[in-house]
């Protein structure tokens, strides 16, 4: 179980780091506009992670956000919005890229992290094996 303390002085990057420590194959991005279920967030709405909560929110709400491995991506995104007015999108690592989890909002964080880990591991193994084969004479 993960706890993220959020107050006016918290930077978005600090929230991202706590989240990624628990889920290394997932990441959070913050946006100016909320998205609907299964919808992608627009890149033009991305908020620079160095900003503090006070720098992006008029309402000052402090609190502790509890995130469980069995929470679905949609639930986590909804909780950030409901409790702190923060629009977040969860991304997952797919091979060498970060992709929005738009069609996977019903997956748990644990499932998404595991899927992404497997995707990355297979990619690394494929690279390793192709590199290995090239050296055979």
Image: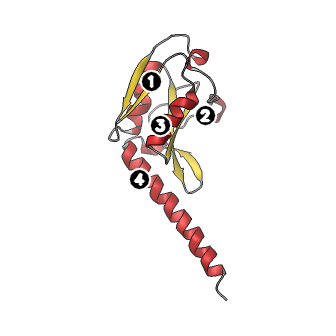
How far, Cα to Cα, is label 4 from label 1?
Answer: 25 Å
State yes or no: discs 3 and 1 in contact (Cβ < 8 Å): no
State yes or no: discs 3 and 2 in contact (Cβ < 8 Å): no
**Foreground mark, 1 or 2?**
1
Q: Is residue 104 above or below residue 42?
A: below
**Foreground mark, 3 or 2?**
3
State yes or no: discs 4 and 2 in contact (Cβ < 8 Å): no
Is tag 4's residue or tag 3's residue first in the polypeptide sequence?
A: 3
Is tag 3's residue or tag 1's residue first in the polypeptide sequence?
A: 1
The residue that label 4 is drawn on is 114
Callout 2: helix, strand or loop? Answer: loop
Q: Which mark is residue 42?
A: 2
Q: Residue at x 45, y 59 (%)?
A: 118
The residue that label 3 is drawn on is 19
Is tag 3's residue or tag 2's residue first in the polypeptide sequence?
A: 3
Callout 4: helix, strand or loop? Answer: helix
Is tag 4's residue or tag 2's residue first in the polypeptide sequence?
A: 2
How far, Cα to Cα, is label 3 from label 1?
Answer: 11 Å
The residue that label 1 is drawn on is 5
Q: Residues within 10 Å of mark 3 (few under 14, many from 20)?
A: some
């Amino acid at each position: 179980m993960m706890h993220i303390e959020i107050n006016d002085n918290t930077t978005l990057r600090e929230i991202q780091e706590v989240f990624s420590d628990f889920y290394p194959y997932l990441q959070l991005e913050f946006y100016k506009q909320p998205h609907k279920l299964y919808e992608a967030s627009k890149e033009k709405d991305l908020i620079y992670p160095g900003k503090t909560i006070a720098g992006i929110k008029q309402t000052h709400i402090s609190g502790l956000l509890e995130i469980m491995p069995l929470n679905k991506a949609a639930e986590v995104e909804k909780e950030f919005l409901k409790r702190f007015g923060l629009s977040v999108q969860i991304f997952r690592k797919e091979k060498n890229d970060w992709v929005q989890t738009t069609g996977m909002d019903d997956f748990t964080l644990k499932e998404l992290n595991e899927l992404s880990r497997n995707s990355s591991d297979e990619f690394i193994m494929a690279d390793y094996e192709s590199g290995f084969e090239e050296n055979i004479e």
